[in-house]
Image (cartoon, grey):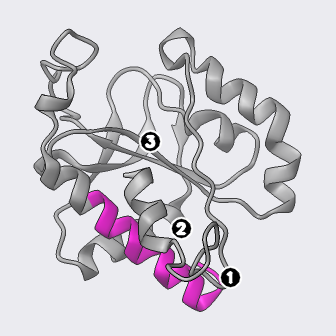
Amino acid sequence: ISFEMLKHFADPNTKGKSTLKNTRLKFVSFGSEETGLTGSYNYVEVKAEELKRENAHIINIDSIRLPEEVCIVEREIMNGTTFTPLLVNKLKQSFASKNISLKTGSTPVGGTDGVFFIRAGIPAVSMVGLSMEKLDPTYHTRRDVIENLNPVALENTKKGLVELVEHWDKNSTL
């Protein structure tokens, strides 16, 4: 999804430049999620003040696999995190404007890399593409392979996010 977003917003006439006028995108990948979200925790520890100065907003993408299960996470029950309502609503609007099915819900177990951004006061939201009601058979198993990803889920998520970024850039604000 990140790579396709980069391609979408790449200026075809100027290598290394974006077509966006008022928005800068950063794509960050975190390790060690399963050891207490330590990758995102350490990133936030180092970058929080910079992110605040930049007025950063975080959209954390986690395990997008099935188009019918793509979900905006509003809350994480186990750690008490509530994600930024403005981001939740803008994502809903962006996906709806493209007629892309999208759920909202709460994670029943675990946590996502969006947690420490919220705790640091940085607007954030997480998206998941696995069932929020039952354990997905690929979740952290040997079945967690690329062949079990549905390309429609990836494409739909990209389209919804592109819509959000284009709207954001055009209006210079959410």
Asked if 118 appears above or below 108 in the picture, the reply is below
Disc nearest the viewer among 2 and 1: 1
Numbered-mark total: 3
Location of the C terminus by quadrant is bottom right
Residues packed near mark 1 inside 10 Å, few (<14), some (14 to 19) or many (20 plus):
few
Relative horizontal placement of residue 165, taking residue 173 as reference (left or right): left
Asked if 43 appears above or below 150 in the picture, the reply is above
**What residue did someone put label 1 on?**
22
Label 3: element kind? strand
Which residue does the image show at 30% across and 68% down from the upper left?
159
Task: Estimate the spatial distance between the alpha carbons at disc 2 and disc 1, rounded to whole Å.
Answer: 19 Å
**What residue did someone put label 2 on?**
86
Asked if 60 appears above or below 36 in the picture, the reply is below
The one of 170 and 97 positioned closer to us in this rendering: 170
Q: Quadrant of residue 155?
A: bottom left
Overall secondary structure of the magenta section: helix
Q: Which residues are magenta?
A: 157-174
Residue 100 in the image: state x and y as whole percent.
18, 68
Q: What's the amino acid at mark 3? A: Arg
User: Is 84 one of the magenta-colored residues?
Assistant: no
Relative horizontal placement of residue 61, taking residue 17 as reference (left or right): left
User: Is 172 one of the magenta-colored residues?
Assistant: yes
**What residue did someone put label 3 on?**
75
Task: Estimate the spatial distance between the alpha carbons at disc 3 and disc 2, rounded to whole Å.
Answer: 14 Å
The one of 154 and 94 positioned closer to us in this rendering: 154
Q: What's the amino acid at mark 1? A: Asn
Of callouts 2 and 1, the N-terminal one: 1
